[in-house]
Image (cartoon, rainbow, N blue to C red):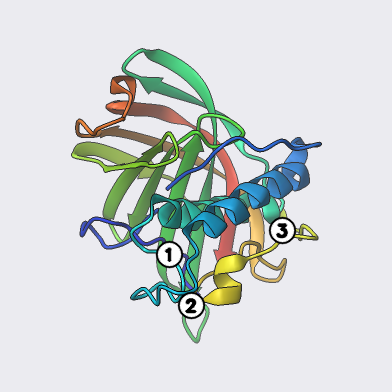
């Protein structure tokens, strides 16, 4: 099953969004981070859920809600630590200087009947703090890419220009499950990817990645986030082959 995110704009037709402050008793290590992100994920999905709506492609979710996009983004972000990958510290340059965010790369590939890789879909996800107040998600598929910024719970903006590079994975140990997580999208809708991957198809991995993106002036978006640059550096993540 291919990882996917639904994007409010037509560019590539794929991608993501954001939420508020939630306490967590232990947000360290992949398992603790996964449980914390799971709480954010469930709250975002609940905020977008409307069982009376019958929204197209949403089956009970208000697809016009900014929390619908945040819900989807968090489901993909969660897959990294839930599968055992600890997000890396990432140097992110905004219009006001260099900051340290957290980030990871997810590489999900489909194999053919003889084991050859047919295609690869890669996500670079970087976020500003434990509660994912600001996040930039960059997707690379078959030479085409898109980047989206999510800010202050309800703001979504698509890139206007930039570049991206993500290296193939250097593989490590097999992924490991995190117990006790929910998946409201998979429980409600069909066709959504899991939030964690079994060791039989998933390995922990390291990548090299870089990106730059310029985002349009958007109501409510901090002008400091109008440009985001990540110099080439190492990312933890997961490689999924199925």
Q: Is residue 104 left or right of residue 117?
A: right
Residue at 37% from the left image edge and 52% from the top image edge: 139
For image coordinates 57% across by 30% down, the residue present is 129
Mark 3 vs 2, N-terminal side:
3
Do the residues bearing badges 3 and 1 touch, measured as CB atoms within 8 Å?
no
Residue 76 placement (x, y as % from top left): 53, 56
Query: What is the secondary structure assignment of the residue under circle 2?
Result: loop
Judged left or right of residue 25, residue 103 is left
Question: Is residue 192 something that shows in the picture?
Answer: yes
Which structural element holds mark 3? Answer: loop
**Residue at horizontal 20 percent and vertical 60 percent from the top:** 10
Give the CA distance from mark 3 to mark 1.
Answer: 20 Å
Q: Is residue 196 above or below residue 41?
A: below
**Foreground disc of the pair 3, 1:** 1
C-alpha separation, residue under disc 3 versus residue under disc 2: 22 Å
Please tell me how crowded label 3 is: few (under 14), some (14-19), or many (20+) other residues with Cα within 10 Å.
Answer: many
Nearer to the camera, 233 or 61: 61
Q: Residues within 10 Å of mark 2 (few under 14, many from 20)?
A: few
């Amino acid at each position: 099953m291919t990882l996917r995110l639904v994007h409010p704009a037509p560019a590539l037709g794929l991608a993501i969004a954001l939420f508020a402050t939630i306490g967590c008793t232990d947000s360290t290590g992949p398992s603790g981070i996964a449980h914390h992100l799971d709480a954010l994920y469930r709250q975002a999905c609940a905020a977008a859920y409307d069982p009376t709506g019958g929204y197209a492609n949403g089956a009970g979710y208000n697809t016009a809600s900014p929390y619908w996009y945040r819900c989807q983004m968090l489901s993909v972000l969660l897959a990294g630590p839930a599968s055992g990958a600890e997000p890396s510290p990432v140097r992110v340059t905004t219009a006001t200087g260099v900051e340290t965010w957290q980030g990871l790369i997810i590489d999900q590939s489909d194999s053919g009947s003889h084991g050859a890789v047919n295609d690869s879909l890669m996500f670079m996800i970087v976020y500003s703090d434990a509660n994912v107040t600001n996040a930039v998600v960059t997707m690379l598929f078959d030479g085409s890419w898109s980047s989206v910024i999510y800010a202050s719970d309800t703001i979504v903006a698509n890139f206007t220009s930039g570049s991206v590079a993500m290296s193939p994975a250097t593989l490590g140990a097999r992924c490991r499950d995190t117990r006790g997580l929910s998946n409201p999208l998979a429980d409600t809708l069909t066709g959504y990817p899991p939030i964690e991957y079994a060791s039989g198809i998933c390995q922990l991995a390291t990548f090299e990645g870089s990106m730059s993106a310029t985002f349009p002036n958007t109501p409510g978006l901090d002008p400091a986030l109008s440009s985001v640059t990540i110099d080439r550096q190492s990312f933890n993540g997961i490689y999924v082959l199925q």
